[in-house]
Image (cartoon, helix red, strand yellow):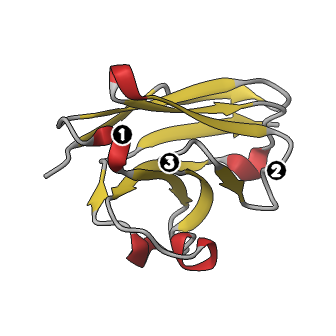
Amino acid sequence: QVQLVESGGGLVQAGGSLRLSCAASGRTFSSHRMGWFRQVPGKEREFVALINRDSGTYYADSVKGRFIISRDNAANTVYLQMNSLKPEDTALYYCAATPRSSTIPYSTSTRAYEYWGQGTQVTVSS
């Protein structure tokens, strides 16, 4: 069992930056693929970024070049550095984890993850 707690959300002006953190419980954090997703009311939860056990990363096209995902296995934490924020980045951001291996396309689906945090709100004003 893995428990995830997100933090770092808030209100920021367009063009600004935020860093989200996701603290994980358990001693097997380093063996999990970690992902960030986001959701706005009335829409499906969408993939943002993932980081593998070997720290390989993959991003949604909408955030590529602006967001950076990283992990600190010693601290059981995954981060999402968000730069050049846009109003369309406004959403509730969720951290997710899975011990399973799967293809990259499948890993951009919410079905690929067993564990989820409660979310942290990011609001970008124009």
Circles 3 and 2: CB distance less than 8 Å?
no
Residue 38 versus residue 48: which sits nearer the camera? 48
Q: Is residue 44 left or right of residue 77?
A: right
Tell me the residue at 41%/73% (across/down).
112
Label 2 SS? loop
The spot of residue 16 in percent (x, y) is 79, 24
Query: Distance from label 2 to label 1 (Cα)?
Result: 24 Å
Query: Is label 1 in a helix, a strand or a loop?
Result: helix
Relative to 17, 55 lies left or right: left
At x 78% / y 36%, what residue is drawn? 85
CB-based contact (under 8 Å), mark 2 and mark 1: no
Residue placed most toward the observer, 24 or 87: 24
Relative to residue 6, is residue 117 depicted above or below? below
In the rendered structure, which disc, 3 or 1, sits on the residue that comes first in sequence?
1
Within-10-Å neighbours for mark 1: few <14, some 14–19, many 20+: many
What type is the residue that disc 1 sits on? Answer: Ser
Q: Nearer the viewer, mark 3 or mark 1?
A: 1
Residue located farthest toward the top when viewing the structure as drawn: 75
Q: Position of residue 73 (x, y in %)?
A: 39, 28
Q: Which residue is most to the left?
A: 1
Q: Earlier in the sequence, mark 3 or mark 2?
A: 2
* Disc ID at residue 93: 3
Task: Residue at 56%, 76% (x, y): give it.
Answer: 103
**Foreground disc of the pair 2, 1:** 1
The residue positioned 30% from the left and 40% from the top of the image is: 29
Compared with 10, 107 (above or below) is below
Tell me how far mark 3 sits from mark 2, CA to CA: 16 Å
User: Identity of the amino acid at label 2?
Assistant: Lys
Q: Amino acid at mark 3?
A: Tyr
Q: Which residue is mark 2?
A: 64
User: How many labels sit on residues?
Assistant: 3
Q: Within 10 Å of the Cα at label 3, are there few (<14), some (14-19), or many (20+) other Cα atoms?
A: many
